[in-house]
Image (cartoon, rainbow, N blue to C red):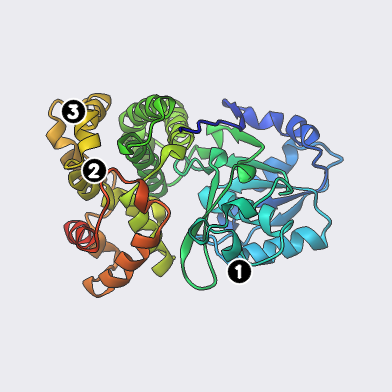
Amino acid sequence: MALISYLTQIHFAYDALRVLPDECARLDIRRPLIVTDAGVRQAGLVDRLIASMNPSAEPIIFDETPANPTEQAVRTAASQFTAENCDGIIALGGGSSIDLGKGVSIAATHSGSLRTFAAIERGMNKITASVSPLIAIPTTAGTGSEVGRAAVVILDDGRKVGLISPHIIPKSAICDPELTIGLPARLTAGSGMDAIAHCMETFMSPAFNPPADGIALDGLRRGWAHIERATFSPHDRDARLNMMSASLQGALAFQKGLGCVHSLSHSLGGIDPRLHHGTLNAIFLPAVIEFNTAAASVKSEKCLPRMAEAMRISDPGKVSDAIREMNIKIGLPRGLSEVGVVRGSFAEIINRALLDHCHKTNPRLATSEDYREILEASM
Protein backbone atom coordinates (compact mmCIF):
# COMPACT_ATOMS: atom_id res chain seq x y z
CA MET A 1 0.00 0.00 0.00
CA ALA A 2 1.34 3.45 -0.90
CA LEU A 3 1.32 6.14 1.79
CA ILE A 4 1.15 9.58 0.18
CA SER A 5 1.23 12.46 2.64
CA TYR A 6 2.09 16.18 2.25
CA LEU A 7 1.90 18.09 5.51
CA THR A 8 3.85 21.35 5.47
CA GLN A 9 2.26 24.77 5.13
CA ILE A 10 4.41 26.45 2.48
CA HIS A 11 4.72 30.16 1.74
CA PHE A 12 6.53 30.62 -1.58
CA ALA A 13 7.17 34.06 -3.07
CA TYR A 14 9.55 36.94 -3.16
CA ASP A 15 8.96 38.83 0.12
CA ALA A 16 7.51 35.69 1.74
CA LEU A 17 9.54 36.49 4.86
CA ARG A 18 6.86 39.02 5.79
CA VAL A 19 4.57 36.18 6.93
CA LEU A 20 6.96 35.16 9.73
CA PRO A 21 5.11 37.06 12.52
CA ASP A 22 1.82 35.43 11.53
CA GLU A 23 3.40 31.98 11.41
CA CYS A 24 4.99 32.44 14.83
CA ALA A 25 1.60 33.47 16.20
CA ARG A 26 -0.13 30.51 14.54
CA LEU A 27 2.35 28.10 16.13
CA ASP A 28 2.41 29.98 19.45
CA ILE A 29 6.15 30.66 19.20
CA ARG A 30 7.17 33.68 21.29
CA ARG A 31 10.75 32.86 22.24
CA PRO A 32 12.30 30.98 19.31
CA LEU A 33 15.76 29.53 19.04
CA ILE A 34 17.11 30.73 15.69
CA VAL A 35 19.31 27.91 14.36
CA THR A 36 21.73 29.15 11.72
CA ASP A 37 25.42 29.28 10.85
CA ALA A 38 28.13 31.90 11.08
CA GLY A 39 28.13 32.61 7.34
CA VAL A 40 24.40 33.29 7.19
CA ARG A 41 24.69 35.56 10.21
CA GLN A 42 27.66 37.40 8.75
CA ALA A 43 25.70 37.96 5.54
CA GLY A 44 23.13 39.91 7.56
CA LEU A 45 20.28 37.45 7.07
CA VAL A 46 19.77 36.87 10.80
CA ASP A 47 19.39 40.61 11.36
CA ARG A 48 16.95 40.71 8.48
CA LEU A 49 14.99 37.83 9.98
CA ILE A 50 14.78 39.46 13.41
CA ALA A 51 13.71 42.78 11.83
CA SER A 52 10.77 40.97 10.21
CA MET A 53 9.55 39.52 13.53
CA ASN A 54 7.03 40.92 15.95
CA PRO A 55 8.77 43.47 18.23
CA SER A 56 7.58 41.51 21.27
CA ALA A 57 9.43 38.37 20.16
CA GLU A 58 12.46 37.29 22.18
CA PRO A 59 14.69 35.33 19.78
CA ILE A 60 17.77 33.45 20.96
CA ILE A 61 20.50 32.76 18.40
CA PHE A 62 22.52 29.59 17.83
CA ASP A 63 24.93 30.19 14.95
CA GLU A 64 27.33 27.26 15.30
CA THR A 65 25.84 24.89 12.73
CA PRO A 66 28.69 22.97 11.06
CA ALA A 67 28.85 22.27 7.32
CA ASN A 68 27.44 18.80 8.04
CA PRO A 69 25.29 18.77 11.21
CA THR A 70 26.60 16.65 14.06
CA GLU A 71 25.09 15.08 17.14
CA GLN A 72 27.42 17.23 19.26
CA ALA A 73 26.11 20.43 17.65
CA VAL A 74 22.53 19.23 18.20
CA ARG A 75 23.28 18.67 21.89
CA THR A 76 24.80 22.11 22.27
CA ALA A 77 21.87 23.84 20.57
CA ALA A 78 19.32 21.75 22.50
CA SER A 79 20.98 22.74 25.78
CA GLN A 80 20.69 26.39 24.79
CA PHE A 81 17.04 25.84 23.81
CA THR A 82 16.30 24.42 27.27
CA ALA A 83 18.38 26.90 29.26
CA GLU A 84 16.76 29.88 27.51
CA ASN A 85 13.21 28.48 27.89
CA CYS A 86 12.60 28.58 24.15
CA ASP A 87 9.22 27.48 22.82
CA GLY A 88 10.01 26.84 19.18
CA ILE A 89 12.71 26.81 16.52
CA ILE A 90 13.32 28.93 13.44
CA ALA A 91 15.91 27.28 11.20
CA LEU A 92 17.50 29.81 8.84
CA GLY A 93 20.07 28.59 6.33
CA GLY A 94 20.83 25.68 4.06
CA GLY A 95 19.99 22.06 4.67
CA SER A 96 22.54 21.78 7.47
CA SER A 97 20.86 24.43 9.62
CA ILE A 98 17.39 23.07 8.91
CA ASP A 99 18.45 19.49 9.66
CA LEU A 100 20.15 20.67 12.84
CA GLY A 101 16.93 22.43 13.79
CA LYS A 102 15.03 19.18 13.31
CA GLY A 103 17.58 17.41 15.50
CA VAL A 104 17.08 20.02 18.20
CA SER A 105 13.30 19.63 17.97
CA ILE A 106 13.82 15.97 18.87
CA ALA A 107 16.63 16.29 21.40
CA ALA A 108 14.93 19.06 23.38
CA THR A 109 11.78 16.98 23.88
CA HIS A 110 12.94 13.34 23.91
CA SER A 111 15.42 11.49 26.08
CA GLY A 112 18.23 9.41 24.66
CA SER A 113 20.99 9.89 22.13
CA LEU A 114 20.14 10.65 18.50
CA ARG A 115 21.17 7.11 17.64
CA THR A 116 17.95 6.04 19.39
CA PHE A 117 15.92 7.76 16.67
CA ALA A 118 17.94 6.82 13.57
CA ALA A 119 16.04 5.06 10.79
CA ILE A 120 18.70 2.36 10.46
CA GLU A 121 18.30 1.68 14.20
CA ARG A 122 14.53 1.33 13.73
CA GLY A 123 13.98 4.48 15.72
CA MET A 124 11.39 6.19 13.51
CA ASN A 125 8.45 5.33 15.75
CA LYS A 126 10.27 6.65 18.80
CA ILE A 127 9.91 10.22 17.53
CA THR A 128 6.59 11.54 18.83
CA ALA A 129 4.34 14.53 18.23
CA SER A 130 5.87 16.19 21.30
CA VAL A 131 8.68 17.67 19.14
CA SER A 132 9.13 21.43 19.31
CA PRO A 133 7.43 23.39 16.51
CA LEU A 134 9.81 24.29 13.70
CA ILE A 135 9.69 27.01 11.05
CA ALA A 136 12.18 26.43 8.22
CA ILE A 137 13.50 29.28 6.08
CA PRO A 138 15.96 28.11 3.40
CA THR A 139 18.75 30.39 2.16
CA THR A 140 20.00 27.93 -0.47
CA ALA A 141 18.17 26.01 -3.19
CA GLY A 142 19.13 22.36 -2.95
CA THR A 143 18.22 20.16 -0.03
CA GLY A 144 14.53 20.98 0.26
CA SER A 145 14.80 20.11 3.94
CA GLU A 146 12.16 22.74 4.66
CA VAL A 147 9.50 20.25 3.53
CA GLY A 148 11.29 16.97 4.17
CA ARG A 149 10.56 14.40 6.85
CA ALA A 150 14.23 13.61 7.45
CA ALA A 151 17.21 15.16 9.20
CA VAL A 152 20.60 13.81 8.18
CA VAL A 153 23.05 14.04 11.08
CA ILE A 154 26.52 12.67 11.80
CA LEU A 155 26.31 10.67 15.03
CA ASP A 156 28.99 10.60 17.71
CA ASP A 157 30.12 7.23 16.29
CA GLY A 158 30.82 8.84 12.88
CA ARG A 159 27.85 7.43 10.96
CA LYS A 160 25.83 9.84 8.85
CA VAL A 161 22.23 8.75 9.38
CA GLY A 162 18.68 9.82 8.72
CA LEU A 163 16.29 10.73 11.51
CA ILE A 164 12.99 10.22 9.76
CA SER A 165 9.49 11.00 10.97
CA PRO A 166 6.45 12.95 9.79
CA HIS A 167 6.61 14.72 13.16
CA ILE A 168 9.82 16.56 12.25
CA ILE A 169 8.51 17.99 9.00
CA PRO A 170 8.56 21.75 9.64
CA LYS A 171 5.19 23.12 10.57
CA SER A 172 5.87 26.04 8.27
CA ALA A 173 8.22 26.54 5.32
CA ILE A 174 8.92 30.11 4.25
CA CYS A 175 10.55 29.97 0.82
CA ASP A 176 11.70 33.43 -0.23
CA PRO A 177 14.02 33.33 -3.28
CA GLU A 178 15.27 36.79 -2.28
CA LEU A 179 17.31 35.10 0.46
CA THR A 180 19.33 33.22 -2.18
CA ILE A 181 20.18 36.26 -4.30
CA GLY A 182 23.96 36.63 -4.51
CA LEU A 183 24.71 33.13 -3.24
CA PRO A 184 28.29 32.22 -4.32
CA ALA A 185 28.61 30.31 -7.59
CA ARG A 186 30.13 27.12 -6.16
CA LEU A 187 27.44 26.85 -3.48
CA THR A 188 24.71 27.60 -6.02
CA ALA A 189 26.05 24.89 -8.31
CA GLY A 190 26.47 22.20 -5.65
CA SER A 191 23.11 22.94 -4.04
CA GLY A 192 21.37 23.06 -7.41
CA MET A 193 22.73 19.68 -8.44
CA ASP A 194 21.52 18.33 -5.10
CA ALA A 195 17.99 19.36 -6.08
CA ILE A 196 18.40 17.81 -9.53
CA ALA A 197 19.69 14.57 -7.99
CA HIS A 198 16.65 14.47 -5.71
CA CYS A 199 14.29 14.81 -8.65
CA MET A 200 16.06 12.18 -10.74
CA GLU A 201 16.56 9.57 -8.01
CA THR A 202 12.97 9.98 -6.89
CA PHE A 203 11.67 9.51 -10.41
CA MET A 204 13.73 6.33 -10.87
CA SER A 205 12.61 4.85 -7.54
CA PRO A 206 10.23 1.91 -8.19
CA ALA A 207 7.76 2.84 -5.43
CA PHE A 208 4.20 3.73 -6.50
CA ASN A 209 3.64 7.46 -6.05
CA PRO A 210 2.36 9.17 -9.23
CA PRO A 211 2.09 12.62 -7.58
CA ALA A 212 5.75 12.38 -6.58
CA ASP A 213 6.71 11.38 -10.12
CA GLY A 214 4.95 14.41 -11.58
CA ILE A 215 6.43 16.79 -9.05
CA ALA A 216 9.92 15.34 -9.60
CA LEU A 217 9.77 15.66 -13.39
CA ASP A 218 8.65 19.29 -13.24
CA GLY A 219 11.33 20.01 -10.63
CA LEU A 220 13.94 18.44 -12.91
CA ARG A 221 12.74 20.55 -15.82
CA ARG A 222 13.02 23.76 -13.79
CA GLY A 223 16.33 22.87 -12.19
CA TRP A 224 18.07 21.77 -15.37
CA ALA A 225 16.88 24.82 -17.32
CA HIS A 226 17.99 27.35 -14.71
CA ILE A 227 21.03 26.02 -12.82
CA GLU A 228 23.57 27.53 -15.19
CA ARG A 229 21.94 30.96 -15.13
CA ALA A 230 21.61 30.89 -11.35
CA THR A 231 25.28 29.93 -11.00
CA PHE A 232 26.73 32.61 -13.26
CA SER A 233 24.09 35.34 -12.88
CA PRO A 234 23.63 35.39 -9.09
CA HIS A 235 21.06 38.20 -9.18
CA ASP A 236 18.83 36.63 -11.85
CA ARG A 237 15.52 36.61 -10.00
CA ASP A 238 13.75 34.22 -12.37
CA ALA A 239 16.59 31.68 -12.16
CA ARG A 240 16.67 31.92 -8.37
CA LEU A 241 12.90 31.42 -8.14
CA ASN A 242 12.98 28.36 -10.36
CA MET A 243 15.94 26.81 -8.52
CA MET A 244 14.17 27.27 -5.19
CA SER A 245 11.10 25.63 -6.71
CA ALA A 246 13.21 22.71 -8.01
CA SER A 247 14.66 22.27 -4.53
CA LEU A 248 11.24 22.33 -2.90
CA GLN A 249 9.79 19.93 -5.48
CA GLY A 250 12.66 17.47 -5.14
CA ALA A 251 12.02 17.20 -1.42
CA LEU A 252 8.24 17.01 -1.76
CA ALA A 253 8.83 14.08 -4.11
CA PHE A 254 11.63 12.20 -2.40
CA GLN A 255 9.44 10.74 0.30
CA LYS A 256 8.95 8.17 -2.47
CA GLY A 257 12.55 7.07 -1.92
CA LEU A 258 16.05 7.91 -3.10
CA GLY A 259 18.84 5.48 -3.96
CA CYS A 260 22.52 4.74 -4.44
CA VAL A 261 23.52 8.34 -5.06
CA HIS A 262 22.46 9.24 -1.55
CA SER A 263 23.65 5.99 0.03
CA LEU A 264 27.13 6.85 -1.20
CA SER A 265 27.04 10.57 -0.44
CA HIS A 266 25.73 9.94 3.08
CA SER A 267 28.44 7.35 3.61
CA LEU A 268 31.29 9.48 2.28
CA GLY A 269 29.99 12.63 3.98
CA GLY A 270 30.12 10.83 7.32
CA ILE A 271 33.69 9.72 6.69
CA ASP A 272 34.80 13.21 5.63
CA PRO A 273 32.37 15.88 6.91
CA ARG A 274 34.23 18.58 4.98
CA LEU A 275 32.74 17.31 1.71
CA HIS A 276 29.67 19.10 0.37
CA HIS A 277 26.66 16.80 0.12
CA GLY A 278 25.22 18.27 -3.08
CA THR A 279 28.59 18.19 -4.80
CA LEU A 280 28.98 14.51 -3.96
CA ASN A 281 25.52 13.83 -5.36
CA ALA A 282 26.51 15.58 -8.59
CA ILE A 283 29.62 13.40 -8.87
CA PHE A 284 27.81 10.11 -8.19
CA LEU A 285 24.67 10.78 -10.25
CA PRO A 286 25.96 9.87 -13.75
CA ALA A 287 27.41 6.49 -12.72
CA VAL A 288 24.31 5.59 -10.70
CA ILE A 289 22.02 6.41 -13.63
CA GLU A 290 24.11 4.12 -15.82
CA PHE A 291 23.89 1.40 -13.17
CA ASN A 292 20.13 1.85 -12.88
CA THR A 293 19.43 1.52 -16.58
CA ALA A 294 19.61 -2.26 -16.21
CA ALA A 295 16.71 -2.23 -13.72
CA ALA A 296 13.39 -3.48 -15.06
CA SER A 297 11.43 -0.66 -13.41
CA VAL A 298 13.57 2.00 -15.03
CA LYS A 299 13.14 0.40 -18.44
CA SER A 300 9.46 -0.45 -18.18
CA GLU A 301 8.48 3.01 -16.91
CA LYS A 302 10.69 4.64 -19.53
CA CYS A 303 12.40 6.77 -16.92
CA LEU A 304 15.35 7.78 -19.06
CA PRO A 305 13.28 9.04 -22.04
CA ARG A 306 11.02 11.05 -19.74
CA MET A 307 13.94 12.56 -17.84
CA ALA A 308 15.69 13.32 -21.12
CA GLU A 309 12.56 15.06 -22.36
CA ALA A 310 12.40 17.20 -19.20
CA MET A 311 16.06 18.10 -19.72
CA ARG A 312 15.54 18.73 -23.48
CA ILE A 313 18.06 16.06 -24.41
CA SER A 314 17.19 14.32 -27.67
CA ASP A 315 19.05 11.06 -26.95
CA PRO A 316 18.11 9.40 -23.60
CA GLY A 317 21.39 7.52 -23.71
CA LYS A 318 23.21 10.85 -23.30
CA VAL A 319 21.64 11.83 -19.96
CA SER A 320 24.64 10.76 -17.88
CA ASP A 321 27.07 12.49 -20.24
CA ALA A 322 24.97 15.65 -20.06
CA ILE A 323 25.21 15.65 -16.27
CA ARG A 324 28.98 15.21 -16.40
CA GLU A 325 29.22 18.09 -18.87
CA MET A 326 27.00 20.30 -16.71
CA ASN A 327 29.10 19.58 -13.64
CA ILE A 328 32.19 20.80 -15.48
CA LYS A 329 30.36 23.78 -16.97
CA ILE A 330 29.19 25.09 -13.58
CA GLY A 331 32.53 24.55 -11.91
CA LEU A 332 32.02 21.36 -9.93
CA PRO A 333 34.70 18.65 -9.61
CA ARG A 334 35.04 16.15 -12.43
CA GLY A 335 35.33 13.26 -10.00
CA LEU A 336 36.03 12.06 -6.48
CA SER A 337 39.79 12.31 -6.87
CA GLU A 338 39.45 16.09 -7.17
CA VAL A 339 37.92 16.27 -3.68
CA GLY A 340 40.59 14.06 -2.12
CA VAL A 341 38.90 10.66 -2.14
CA VAL A 342 41.33 7.73 -2.48
CA ARG A 343 40.65 4.13 -3.44
CA GLY A 344 41.89 2.97 -0.06
CA SER A 345 38.68 4.37 1.48
CA PHE A 346 36.37 2.39 -0.83
CA ALA A 347 35.79 -0.49 1.61
CA GLU A 348 34.56 1.80 4.38
CA ILE A 349 32.42 3.83 1.99
CA ILE A 350 30.80 0.65 0.65
CA ASN A 351 30.16 -0.85 4.09
CA ARG A 352 28.37 2.30 5.23
CA ALA A 353 26.43 2.67 1.97
CA LEU A 354 25.03 -0.85 2.30
CA LEU A 355 23.56 0.14 5.68
CA ASP A 356 22.17 3.52 4.61
CA HIS A 357 18.41 4.06 4.64
CA CYS A 358 18.45 4.98 0.92
CA HIS A 359 20.15 1.75 -0.16
CA LYS A 360 17.05 -0.43 -0.42
CA THR A 361 14.91 2.09 -2.34
CA ASN A 362 17.20 2.18 -5.37
CA PRO A 363 15.51 0.60 -8.43
CA ARG A 364 18.31 -1.95 -8.65
CA LEU A 365 19.71 -3.36 -5.41
CA ALA A 366 23.45 -2.74 -5.36
CA THR A 367 25.99 -5.28 -4.11
CA SER A 368 29.38 -4.45 -2.64
CA GLU A 369 30.95 -5.01 -6.04
CA ASP A 370 28.35 -2.79 -7.71
CA TYR A 371 29.18 0.04 -5.31
CA ARG A 372 32.88 -0.46 -5.97
CA GLU A 373 32.27 -0.12 -9.72
CA ILE A 374 30.18 3.04 -9.19
CA LEU A 375 32.94 4.52 -7.04
CA GLU A 376 35.55 3.65 -9.64
CA ALA A 377 33.46 5.20 -12.41
CA SER A 378 33.06 8.35 -10.28
CA MET A 379 36.77 8.85 -9.62
Question: In 3D space, how far apart are the residues under numbered discs 3 and 1 (Cα atoms)?
Answer: 45 Å
At a point 61% along the width and 40% down the height, the residue shown is 137
Percent coordinates x, y for residue 359 in the rendering? 35, 53
Q: Secondary structure at mark 1?
A: helix
- Neighbourhood count class around disc 1 (C-alpha, 10 Å): few under 14, some 14–19, many 20 upward: some
Indicate which label's residue lies in the foreground, 3 or 2. Answer: 3
Percent coordinates x, y for residue 216 in the rendering? 38, 30
> Does residue 138 appear to the left or right of 307 in the view shown?
right
Return the residue at label 3.
Answer: 313
Are the residues flagged by discs 1 and 2 in contact, CB closer than 8 Å?
no
At a point 43% along the width and 25% down the height, the residue shown is 211
At a point 79% along the width and 41% down the height, the residue shown is 29
Kind of residue sitting beneath label 3? Ile
Percent coordinates x, y for residue 208 in the rendering? 38, 31
Kind of residue sitting beneath label 1? Gln
Quadrant of the rendered structure where residue 123 is? bottom right
Question: In 3D space, how far apart are the residues under numbered discs 1 and 2 (Cα atoms)?
Answer: 37 Å
Return the residue at label 2.
Answer: 329
> Does residue 52 appear to the left or right of 343 in the view shown?
right
